[in-house]
Image (cartoon, helix red, strand yellow):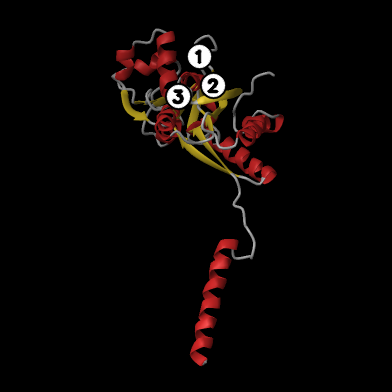
């Protein structure tokens, strides 16, 4: 009898554990929060982190960012065929994603303004684009295959008839992201670089900004788009609307971005 009682007791315990594992430790289903996976250019990290936090609080979801160079992200999306949104640092990559059938909808949000950045004190006396070809200048530029600012820098140099070979002779560093270029110039590892103006916010003690004349510059529009393989189209549309909202614009402006007139 005692043996029967012990066997029955053990069976009841096993059944109880199985039931709890099926129902969850609280005795009922505990749904994990929905997530949005966003491929985002590294130059937008500061404002997008804040936007993501605000969106999470308002919609009770989790926003996961993959920050990297825009070209790198595009390659990842082609291979993985997963994710919800794409926000590159330049419209060229967005248009390529559209052509590839990776993006199904999108919206222009803010603008990226390229500038020349030099270490504090401007030791190499860089004052204009042509100075980047001066002998002995240590130049850092973005990798045009990896990040938007690298590709755009080449376009700016070509637009202003700056000899590419003379520039390449001075390049000692190619960054995969704009953030790598900012670090290099702030530490004095290079004498000059071309980066986004917004990426220099908070680096004023170590870096000086040399604006380019409007007629020489190429300002980029930053779009955000929904991917074809997005898991929740409605939630992704709400995220796009939030990024492009007046509240989103205020966050971008706080971090040095320019918002186009709507």
Badge 1 is on which residue?
A: 217
Q: Which residue is mark 3?
A: 148
C-alpha separation, residue under disc 3 versus residue under disc 2: 12 Å
Image point (56%, 27%), residue name: 225
**Which residue occupies 60% across, 40% down?**
52
| Nearest the eye: 71 or 136 | 71
Determine contact: label 1, label 3, CB under 8 Å.
no
Contact flag, marks 1 and 2 (Cβ < 8 Å): yes
Q: Residue at x 35, y 28 (%)?
A: 174
Q: Nearer the viewer, residue 112 or 122?
A: 112
SS for callout 2: loop
Q: Identify whether 55 is placed above or below 185.
A: below
Which residue has dot 2 on it?
Answer: 113
Contact (Cβ within 8 Å) of mark 3 with mark 2: no
Disc 1 and disc 2: Cα gap in Å? Answer: 8 Å
Quadrant for the C terminus, please.
top right
Q: Position of residue 251 (x, y in %)?
A: 65, 34
The secondary element bearing badge 1 is classed as: loop
Frontmost of labels 3 and 2 is: 3
Quadrant assignment, res 132 = top left
* Residue 144: image location, x then y, percent: 38, 22
Of the numbered discs in the image, which one, if any, rests on residue 64?
none
């Amino acid at each position: 009898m005692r043996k029967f009682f012990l066997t029955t007791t053990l069976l009841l315990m096993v059944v109880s554990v199985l039931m709890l594992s099926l129902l969850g430790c609280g005795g009922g289903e505990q749904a994990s929060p929905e997530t949005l996976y966003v491929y985002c250019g590294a130059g937008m990290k500061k404002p997008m982190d804040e936007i993501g936090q605000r969106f999470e609080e308002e919609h009770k979801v989790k926003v996961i960012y993959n920050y990297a160079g825009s070209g790198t992200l595009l390659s990842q999306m082609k291979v993985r065929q997963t994710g919800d949104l794409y926000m590159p640092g330049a419209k060229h990559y967005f248009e390529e994603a559209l052509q590839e059938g990776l993006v199904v909808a999108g919206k222009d949000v803010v603008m990226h303004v390229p500038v020349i950045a030099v270490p504090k004190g401007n030791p190499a006396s860089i004052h204009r684009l042509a100075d980047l070809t001066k002998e002995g200048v240590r130049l850092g530029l973005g990798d045009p295959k990896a990040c938007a600012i690298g590709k755009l820098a080449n376009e700016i140099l070509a637009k202003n008839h700056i000899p590419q070979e003379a520039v390449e002779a001075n390049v000692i560093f190619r960054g995969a992201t704009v953030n790598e270029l900012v670090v290099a110039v702030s530490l004095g590892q290079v004498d000059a670089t071309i980066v986004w103006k917004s990426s220099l916010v908070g680096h004023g003690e170590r870096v000086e900004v040399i604006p380019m004349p409007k007629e020489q510059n190429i300002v980029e529009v930053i779009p955000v788009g929904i991917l074809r393989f997005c898991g929740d189209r409605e939630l992704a549309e709400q995220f796009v609307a939030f990024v492009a909202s007046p509240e989103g614009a205020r966050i971008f402006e706080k971090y040095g971005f320019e918002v186009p007139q709507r």
